[in-house]
Amino acid sequence: MPGSRAVFQGEYRTVHEISNALCSRDGSLELTTEAFALQKLNSVGDPPPQLLGWDFSTDPWTAKWNLQPAGAPRTLQGEFHAAGVITSHGAVKMTKVLAEAGVVI
């Protein structure tokens, strides 16, 4: 097809600082984070123009996380949206891991 791109798949590590957190009585959690580092771990295919040459970046961008209690104990699920240098969105599932045998995880 004219104008179509091959699929790009990349694995990136990001580092976020929590700049705002709101915990509600119903157990939901709203976070605002500022990502301040991006590192490409691996990739397959040609990256889109926004990611060309991005093996590491320190340009910040903001993400909003909206999480609600899930059916399982100690589990939150919801979505995130990021804007700025990187634009992304997706589903999130977080599970709190309990410390066992005196080891904090």
Image (tube, helix red, strand yellow):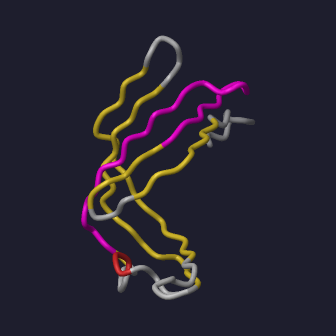
The residue drawn where x is 25% and y is 66% is: 59
The residue drawn where x is 46% and y is 85% is: 3
Is 28 displayed left or right of 56 in the figure?
right
Q: Where 49 falls versus 75 (above or below)?
A: below
- Image quadrant containing the C terminus: top right
Q: Nearer the viewer, residue 16 or 47?
A: 47
Q: Nearer the viewer, residue 37 or 61?
A: 61
Is 74 displayed left or right of 60 in the figure?
right
Quarter-of-image position of residue 30: top left
> Is 64 in the magenta?
yes
Residue 74 screen position, x and y as percent: 65, 27
> Is 3 in the magenta?
no
Identity of the residue furthest to the front in this view: 2
Q: Nearer the viewer, residue 13 or 8?
A: 8
Q: Where 71 falls versus 105 (above or below)?
A: above
The residue drawn where x is 52% and y is 50% is: 90
- Image quadrant containing the N terminus: bottom right
- Secondary structure mostly seen in the magenta stretch: strand
Residue 8 screen position, x and y as percent: 54, 79
Residue 39 screen position, x and y as percent: 42, 72
Q: Where 6 falls versus 79 (above or below)?
A: below
The residue drawn where x is 33% and y is 55% is: 35
Residue 75 screen position, x and y as percent: 64, 31
Which range is magenta? 57-79
